[in-house]
Every structure is written in structure tokens, then in C-alpha cells.
Amino acid sequence: MRLRAELDAAWKGIGALAQMDDGRRDRVVAELRTAVPDVASLAAREVGTEAAVAEISRFAGVGVPGSDPAFPTAVIWDDVVRTAAEAARATC
């Protein structure tokens, strides 16, 4: 459940990145790139690698909300879900 909540919050937050000032945006991106993989790793320990990776894949396939051509939200989102899946696989 925590992984799903973390992915959902990250997915919703990523769409707002283009509207943030540079300093705040950098902090949010750094948090997304660390927090989501950390939670993915914990989830893999709790429920197993396959279940954690399946949940990450479900979110990865949804696409990025509010994508802005001026800011690479899709690239950041792909990086977040890729590193989350890698963290989940590396756990077990």
C-alpha cells in the first residue's frame, strides 16, 4: 500500500513540476528520485519483488500527467520508475 501511495503522489506531483521555480523544482525532483526507489525497495522486502515491480510497471504505463514540452517531465518520470524497479529487483 505504501508503494502505491508513494507512486500515486509522485505521479500527481510530477505534472506540477513545470510550474515550480527552479530551486523548488530541483528539490522535488531529487526527492522523487530517492524516495520512490527507497519505498520500492522496502515494498519488495515486504511483498516480494514481483508484486513490487508489477505495481511500479502499472504506474509506468499510465504516462505523465500535465506533460509540458518546456520541461522534461516524461524523462524524469521514466527515470523515477526505472530506478524504483531496479531498487525493487536488487532487494531480494
Image (cartoon, grey):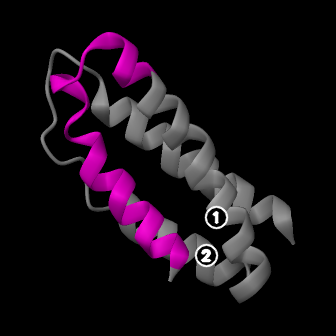
The structure residue drawn at horizontal position 73% and vertical position 64%, both measured from the top left corner, is 41
The structure residue drawn at horizontal position 20% and vertical position 37%, both measured from the top left corner, is 16
Question: Disc 1 on helix, strand or loop?
Answer: helix
Amino acid type, mark 2: Ala
Number of numbered markers = 2
Image coords of residue 64 (percent x, y): 24, 47
The vertical placement of 15 against 51, above or below, is above
Residue wearing tag 2: 52
Q: Is 67 placed left or right of 87 in the picture?
A: left
Residue wearing tag 1: 40
Magenta: main secondary structure equals helix
Residue 25's disc number: none
Image coords of residue 11 (percent x, y): 31, 54
Residue interval drawn in magenta: 2-26
The structure residue drawn at horizontal position 68% and vertical position 55%, both measured from the top left corner, is 38
Could you tell me if the residues under marks 1 and 2 are in contact, i.e. CB atoms within 8 Å? yes
The structure residue drawn at horizontal position 28% and vertical position 46%, both measured from the top left corner, is 13
The vertical placement of 16 against 37, above or below, is above
Q: Foreground residue, 71 or 16?
A: 16
Amino acid type, mark 1: Ala
Q: Foreground residue, 56 or 28?
A: 28
The vertical placement of 42 against 26, above or below, is below
